[in-house]
Amino acid sequence: MARIFAYIAHKDGVLDDTAAELLTAAKAIDAAASPTAIVTGSGAELDAVCKTIQGSYGEVWKIANQALTQPNAELIRKALVAILPPGCIVLLPHSHFGVDLGPGLAVKLKAAAVSDVMAIEGCAGNILKVVRQEFGGQMSAHVACDISSGAVINIRPGSFKPVAGNAANGTVVDKSSEVGALSAGRRYLETIVAESGDVDISKEAVLISIGRGIQEQDNVAMAQELADAMGAALSCSRPVVDAKWLPKSRQVGSSGHTVKPKVYVACGISGSFQHLAGIKGNPFMVAINKNPKAPIFQVADVGIVDDVLEFLPELTTKIRETVK
Amino acid sequence: MEILVCVKRVPDTSENEIELNRAGNDIERDDLVYSINEWDNYAVEEALQLVEKNGGSVTVATVGGEDDEEVLRRELAMGANKAVLISDEAFEGSDGAGIASLLTAHAKKNKYDLILTGAQAEDGAAQVGGMLAAMLDYPFASLVDSIEVMSGGKLVVSREVEGGNKEMNEMDLPCVLSIQTGINEPRYVGMRGIRQVASVEIPTLGASALGIDIAAVGKAAAKVQRTDYFVPALGKGAEILNGSREEVIDKMIELVKAKGGLK
């Protein structure tokens, strides 16, 4: 079985949740695997991360380089290509970073590339069978991946539960000298932090959240009226922000805000994993969608198959009567 | 600035309920409404705006068959200057790397300063842009939500990262960028516009025109292959409220109230 490596994402010296999830994914590929963690960065933060990850991975490859202080996928790709053995399997989180790194890394390693993997069914010879989703989560697919020349596999964050009892007393191997000087045609400048906006949806207990099903800018008002009637705040999914109907500060999801309300009412939201990734704390979720196959119904507590444009105004009227 | 935008025709998930076909090996493709991949449409609009400001031309390319010509024609109507259809029986069944190899072959025969793709398509793989860049040895940035042209053959682009933050990067040209939705407001394309480009010739590029070794593409070369589709198992699954709308509303209010969702 090919050797398995897991790229450990970290920020400000703190491990990303995916560090433990990739370990679970590695064991799903090969139960006997003892995957190697790869950590890149610089300075004390890198050392802190290495120290933590030693607790769960048996071996940790550390690449210390001033140029890797910020995670620039172009530079990290070069570093990885310099040190990885041929035919290995590399696991990455399917995040804004993994999307940046994975495909190009696979090309340079002459390895297969599979992205956004949700489940691993196992290996038969050189064929690894995995599960992915297509069509915004409306359909799942089995995918067969020929790993005979290695593979770069992007794992969907949150899909593989961390396993307790992975205690290891791993050794750190410093690979920095094998990498050498790094430069690329893409240079990190700065990170501009998102503005918080008029309402902080991350602190609201009840959210009325709207998606593509709201259809037109003029219809946003009916959702706001419902929110007002309920004493809730209005949030949304990505298409509403793309269309500029609500500001970015109202977006729930991996590229928006993380919310942790008590009650979440998803109105005309299909339920992509990027959206669901922004909802924490297991709220009571009501989904209203006219498509009975919308993935949101898989995760909601209560589902209502109806057109939000007709349903919401009637709901608002009734709630006004109820709370009067 | 000569810009190539790689596009794809996909089933429109906002217009269709995607269902399994009777054999269970594919989605039911009869009566599907197809459209241009949403991310790609933003990429074409961005290319058009860059050319409006900086000069140059926009070429749109897709890998597919005759049916895929309609999205090229739509993007011509939007304002693209040229379109090419990369099509050959030998290309069928290509995986992401195969598609990227075909686009690489086309890009190498032409001098593009900038290549744009959508950040992802209906299969959510989000990989062709990054592969194309690596094959061409061009710099790459994914999930780009703004592009500014600087002097000296450079761009400043922002990538959309977690929490809606923007990661600013300087890029050397030529480069490849994958475009995130919301970067602009794609212009409307009417039937009239599409009729106006109905007679524009769209060249078809096959294996010999691209000078590509067919052993490197197509189903036989694909390391990654979808074997079947299936309907995802409902997690815990929602309790669907049935009854008249009035009854459903009453039930919902009762439940939400019990959970502290009504003041």
Image (spheres, rainbow, N blue to C red):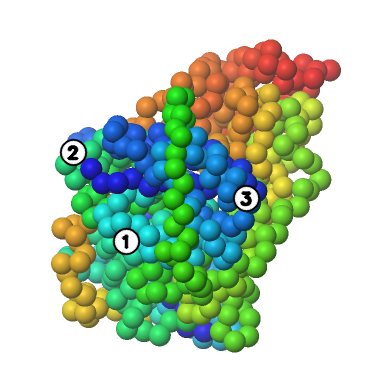
Q: Which residue is mark 3?
A: A45
Element marked by disc 3: helix
Could you give the CA–CA distance between mark 3 and mark 1, rounded to whole angstroms? 28 Å
Q: Amino acid at mark 1?
A: Leu
Q: Callout 1: few (<14), some (14-19), or many (20+) C-alpha neighbours within 10 Å? A: many
User: Which sits in the foreground, B8 or B68?
Assistant: B8
Question: Which label's residue is closer to the chain start, 1 or 2?
Answer: 1
Q: Spatial distance from mark 3 to mark 2, Cα to Cα?
A: 40 Å
Can you identify the residue that label 2 sits on? A124
Q: Which residue type does callout 2 highlight?
A: Ala
SS type, badge 1: helix
Write the residue at 20% across / 66% down.
B216
| Above or below A116: residue B133 | below
* Chain ID of residue with mark 2: A
Q: Nearer the viewer, mark 3 or mark 2?
A: 3
Instruction: Work out whether B150 lies above or below B62.
Output: below
Mark 2 falls on what kind of element?
A: strand
- Residue at 35 percent across and 71 percent down: it is B135
Q: Looking at the image, which residue is at 34% across and 38% down?
A: A34
Relative horizontal placement of residue A91, taking residue B179 as reference (left or right)? left
The C terminus of chain B lies in which quarter of the figure?
top right
- The residue that disc 1 covers is A109
Q: Position of residue B187 (x, y in %)?
A: 57, 67
- Considering only order in the chain, which callout, 2 or 3, is on the residue closer to the N terminus? 3
| Residue B39 vs residue A182, the one in the foreground | A182
Q: Is residue A123 left or right of residue A237?
A: left
Which chain is mark 3 on? A
